[in-house]
Image: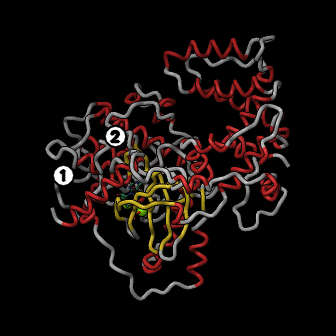
Amino acid sequence: MDIGGLETVVANSAYVSARGGTGTWGRDRWQRARLRLPHISQCEALRARLAGAAQTGGHLEEDTSFRWQCVEQPIGKLLFRRFLEGEPRLAAAGALWAELEAYDRCEAEERPAAAAALRKRFLTPGGEQHCAFLGNMAAPTAAPLEELCAMRRALLSHLEAVAWAPYRESPEFGRFLQFKWLEEQPVGAEAFVEFRVLGKGGFGEVLACQRRTTGTMFANKRLNKKRLKKRRGYEAAMVEKRVLARVHSPFIVSLACAFQTKTDLCLVMTLMNGGDLRYHIYNMDEKNPGFEEPRALFYLAQMLLGLEHLHQHRIVYRDLKPENVLLDDAGHVRLSDMGLAVELKEGQSKTRGYAGTPGFMAPELLRDEEYDWAVDYFTLGVTLYEMLAAKGPFRSCGEKVENQEVKRRTLHEPVSYPERFSTMARDLCEGLLAKDPNTRLGFRDGDCAQLKGHPIFSTINWGRLEAGLVPPPFVPDPRRVYAKDLGDVGAFSSVRGVELDAEDAALADAFASGTVAIPWQQELIDSGLFQELNVWGPPGTLPPDLDP
Ligand code: ADP
Ligand code: MG
Ligand code: MG
């Protein structure tokens, strides 16, 4: 074995053992002990800010809404729920909230019984947990999406009206402030232990790393400042950071934090250990590339949910392709690499600009017309085609074609389908690859309901898929590293002739916005640290850190 090979083996084994939580790295006990909640008296400035009563100086505009503080943030929600449980007149509403969530995750055949139970418990006048604020709303039936949403809306506006104000006076809200204080502490490279390089991007390497306090593994995408400057990459880096910080979906890599070092801008993201879809289509079984239809459909459905989420946030992705879709340990996929995304402003419906990957770009984009999210459903169609056929729709197997020719075919030629496509798969592909964006399947009136209703998806339970409860068709081998050997990743040459100035420093500061609330709170919960820190004394007493 050569030295490069040996290095890879050593790097892989440290990384694999950290991943499994068995390595000497494990959780760093000392660092973990440093994670302490502050005394509540240290949180008064924060309290004023979260109440919207103070200038936010430096910070992004503070979101002081009920939704953000009690529903969307995971720790915010847990503490608000704890408050509800302890208030006799609010406890039933809190229980209903939990039951509605459980209902969402039910198998279709469990639903009628679950609906009957909901009705009996919360909608029977005179009953112990009767929720009178729901009026005479019907409990969900077998096809419940709309009723369920209506009930949830009624529940949340009731809670906002009657529970939000008293909650803000409660010790639970004090505890929330303590966690927000912890969340806002500066974060830098020293918070992580680094492992091997996983891949190479345009501006730097992506490394596996582990947070010392929680033991959670991440991918750190480093962007070299000088290289960014030389190749005018700042804008793309900013877009990628902003997009990742705004979206929270199980089908898009999530951003834990953004910070800087002397040399790099760093994005710390969900670690996706299972390799990318391109690798799985072509390299896992070279004699028999491509996926059987059920496996392709599973990935397609998850990508579709990722796209729907982006489009609901007015973000056009533009770079969907198998290479940018990554597998996690369990075999679920997420979209990654948001560097080419564009954010449409409120009221803006179209954008312009040549961006994407040849062979994936939609006709309207190639014609230099204005376009919207419809381009992403075209790339979804190309990706579906490639998963099934193990080649793109606009090139023959192994063919080397000029971009001009790919463009001509995309614009003018009908796509031909191999034998192995089922009638339904072909029909769906044709719907997605429609040359006219107005007739293409996709995002309409705020969601992808029409596309999700295509008969090919009839076996998919979207609620359970969204909740991560559908078992993936393929599970990556936990001992395997689905990344190139270290020697093959390739090194960067050093950047010459670029000096960083004050303007660059300002850009870097804007980039380094620190911790992202939702993923950080979820990480604390998943690692058990939230439960460890969230200690309450006997009922009727206050723990010392909350006692003013
Ligand atoms: P660029 O935008 O410069 O192309 P990418 O985001 O595509 O950079 O990352 C470069 C490579 O790093 C990817 O091809 C992949 O191999 C690896 N990579 C990126 N993100 C992750 C992640 N979240 N988990 C694991 N590997 C990743
Ligand atoms: Mg990339
Ligand atoms: Mg990119």
- Label 1 sits on a secondary structure element that is loop
Pick whichever, 97 or 155, lies toward us: 97
To which quarter of the image does residue 203 belong? Answer: bottom left
Residue name at image x 73 percent, y 29 percent: 155
Q: Of the residues shown, which amino acid type is indicated by label 2?
A: Cys
Q: Are marks 2 and 1 in contact (CB under 8 Å)?
A: no
Quadrant assignment for ligand 1: bottom left
Residue name at image x 38 percent, y 66 percent: 205
Residue for badge 1: 396
Residue for badge 2: 429
In the image, is 345 to the left or to the right of 107?
Answer: right
Residue name at image x 32 percent, y 48 percent: 277
Q: Distance of mark 2 from mark 1, alpha carbons?
A: 17 Å
Q: Is residue 26 above or below residue 133?
A: below
Characterize the local packing of mark 2: few (<14), some (14-19) or many (20 or more) Cα atoms within 10 angstroms: many
Q: Is residue 215 above or below residue 190?
A: above
Q: Of the residues shown, which amino acid type is indicated by label 1?
A: Ser
